[in-house]
Image (cartoon, rainbow, N blue to C red):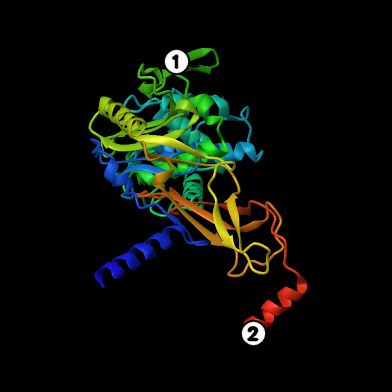
Amino acid sequence: MFKKLKKLVISILTSLIIVTGVGQLSLIKADQTLPQLDLEAKSAIAIDAKTGQIIYTKDDKQTYPVASMSKLLTAYILLQAIHEGKITWETKVTPTVTEVDISNNTELTNVPLKEGHSYTIKQLYQAMLVGSANAATMLIGNSISGTQTKFIDKMRKTAKNLGITDAKIYSANGLTAKYLGDERYPNTDENAENEFSVRDMAIISQKLIEKYPEILETTKLTKVDFNDNGEITTVSNTNELLQDNSNLGIDGLKTGTSDAAGYCFASTTNKDGHRIITILAGAKDNDARFDQTKNLLNYIYNNYDYLAISTDRALRQNVKVKYGKQGSVPATIGNNLSLWVPKNTKEKALQIKLIPKSSTIEAPIKQGEVVGEYQISVAGNLGFIDGSNNLKTKALSDNNVEGINIFIKWWQMLTEVI
């Protein structure tokens, strides 16, 4: 009796893995194959820039001050305005008295602005991303919305449109409110700072690179000359990994530093053609934010493989067909996909589920016809930055399925009713 029961259980489990039209489930747990990594930072996240797959997290949903990493949201809004034709790179704008004062505050990172002088958006944009210039960032906000208050409102709205609901936004540049003078957001405490989770910053970074990849042409610059009517101020990029010799290929994105935030860093690299974004918040010092970022990237490269799943690979499962000369048809994925999987697991780490487009798919069916949806993830996965647990793609019929003779079909329909 026990042997029969054991065989029955094994049979049921096997059926669950290979059942037609339901999906295949890998029973490998990816987290069992990976060593632990505890970064020396308050929070961190690493994602694939293309798919949004989360590869590593540490306290990724808790909001913290992020200082000048806030400038990435300002850059997103500016590039959006540029692409929509609302402003141009050659548009000239003049700073307010407050912004001139802030630009000459030696406590803060800046390029010096002068009262009555005009500056192009391109100048201010480069100063913001390369030199982390705070007053230049505020002037960009004014050029888009007219005032700092209106621009902060736009930042808040834009963040919500990106799916960010937990951020606290008080400035265009991430400065503590007390430094903003009469351009402080109304009814804001002087110690208030922008707060985002590293997940929030990853969302902003991913959207920036996806929609406006030209940002990398600026974030990769090691220095830039700010020309104010012939008076040159050279600013160096605060991202020290741009000149690092570790062969990681960092080409962005932005640092952030304040007493409340500690040392933060949003990085990206396109090593071997696969772009990764990492966000680190609350490192103990300047060296630590870069060292910990390198530790995180090396951890990924040492423990993960990039698995490309192309449409011509044998990723096929069967979908049941009614009234066809075949009782089922193999389905293949509709477009190429890619996922990071633990090393040496390859397809074994995949969780694959095929959901037919309806409970009854009737013949005839043409090759390439949509017959359902594939949902693909990694065993033990951390999900995706948009909140989903898997990649989705159309499931296409791998071949034609002819319908049966009309009289046989009628007979089958009749027997079903009876």
Judged from the image, the secondary structure of the residue bearing numbered disc 2 is helix
Task: Measure how far apart labels 2 and 1 are at the Cα level.
Answer: 83 Å
Q: Is residue 256 left or right of residue 129?
A: left
Q: Looking at the image, which residue is at 39% across and 52% down?
A: 26
Name the amino acid type tagged 1: Thr
For the C terminus, which image quadrant? bottom right
Image quadrant where residue 36 sits: top left
Residue hosting label 2: 417
Quadrant housing the N terminus: bottom left
Q: Residue furthest right?
A: 406
* For discs 2 and 1, the disc positioned in front in the rendered view: 2
Q: Which residue is mark 1?
A: 234
Residue in view at x 27 percent, y 45 percent: 32
Where residue 265 sits, quadrant-wise, is top left
The amino acid type found where label 2 is placed reads Val
Total labels drawn:
2
Q: Answer left or right for 5 relative to 154.
A: left
Q: Position of residue 37 (x, y in %)?
A: 25, 38
Q: Nearer the viewer, residue 191 or 241?
A: 241
Give how far across and how far down residue 224 sits, in percent. 48, 18
What kind of element bears circle 1?
Answer: strand
Residue 72 appears in the figure: yes
* Camera-side residue of 56 and 35: 35
Question: Is 292 rendered above or below residue 12?
Answer: above
**Residue 262, position as x, y percentages in the image:** 27, 35
Quick check: marks 2 and 1 in contact, CB under 8 Å?
no
